[in-house]
Amino acid sequence: MIRLVGMPESALENAAENPAPSAQQAGAAFFDVDNTMMRGASLFHVARKMYQRRAFRMRDVAGFAWKQIMFSVRGENMNDVHSIRESALAFATGIAAKDIEILGEEVYDEMIVSRIWPGTRALAGQHVKAGRKVWLVTGTPIEVARVIAQRLGLTGALGTVGEITDGLYTGKLVGDFLHGPAKAVAVTALADVEGLNLEDCWAYSDSFNDIPLLSVVGHPVAINPDTRLRRHARDNNWPVYDFRSGRRAATLGLRTATGAGIVYGAWKSLDKYRRR
């Protein structure tokens, strides 16, 4: 039996014993989460919720918040990804697994649902209607990834799994952090269990770091791509969807208006000072 990180053994057993009869014909679709299925980084919202439960201090949240802003603007940076991962593991040490499951529900309802990209959700829905299984593949903790998949009506999720001993998180991982090449490995293992031909499958991501995942399927698609992935997609004739244009225009307009307001306010203050 394959030990696939992010997927329960029971699910693997069921898939192996009862593979979907139309799997070879229908294929499957695999979606990254952060900046692909939703705006920003899901792990930031997990950290934010943990802060509300007083798991750590305000300055730790400030660090997470800054990384979230930069992630939304420029895409993934491996130093930030590993920093967030290590911090999250440290914060989770000693927390009950049941509490994290409840936290996953709260994080989705309060913070994630409003950040789901309608365009990406529609693409996932089209695959579901076509009879394909749809999986999330993400470095996000599996407890949160499963909730997102369930709420979106998807098949399931592959995510990062924390080690649990006596019902408590140890601060260590089971297997690898599900990021970069590890995603391609996980999807290949899942395809073997499910009887999928990866040439008939789709994968969606925003990040250059996910090129291994995108390259392992027959239908790679870039969504909200960072600069390097956009260039790679163009060079390889991969489809590109960008659902950020309206948001970018609104953000630019807000920044312009805010900047103009600041300049005007400073000028008025200086003028009053001079008159005095």
Image: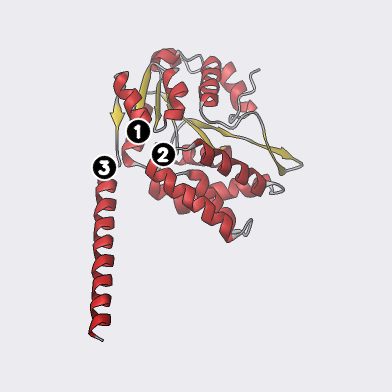
Tell whether 125 sits left or right of 4: left
In the picture, the disc for residue 37 is: none
Determine whether the residue tagged by mark 1 lies in a helix, strand or loop. helix
The reply to whether discs 2 and 1 touch (Cβ–Cβ < 8 Å) is yes
Q: Is residue 109 visible?
A: no
Q: Which residue is mark 1?
A: 227
- Amino acid at dot 1: Thr
Dividing the picture into quadrants, the one containing residue 2 is top right
- Amino acid at dot 2: Gly
Q: Is residue 164 visible?
A: yes
Q: Earlier in the sequence, mark 2 or mark 1?
A: 2
Q: Which residue is mark 2?
A: 75
The reply to whether discs 2 and 3 touch (Cβ–Cβ < 8 Å) is no
- Amino acid at dot 3: Ser
Report the residue that reaches farthest toward the right.
166
Mark 2 → mark 1, Cα distance in angstroms: 9 Å
68 up-or-down from 191: above or below: below
Q: Earlier in the sequence, mark 2 or mark 3?
A: 2
Residue 29 location (% of width, % of height): 41, 25
Front position among marks 2 and 3: 2
Residue 213 location (% of width, % of height): 46, 23
Q: Which residue is mark 3?
A: 245
Determine whether the residue tagged by mark 3 lies in a helix, strand or loop. helix
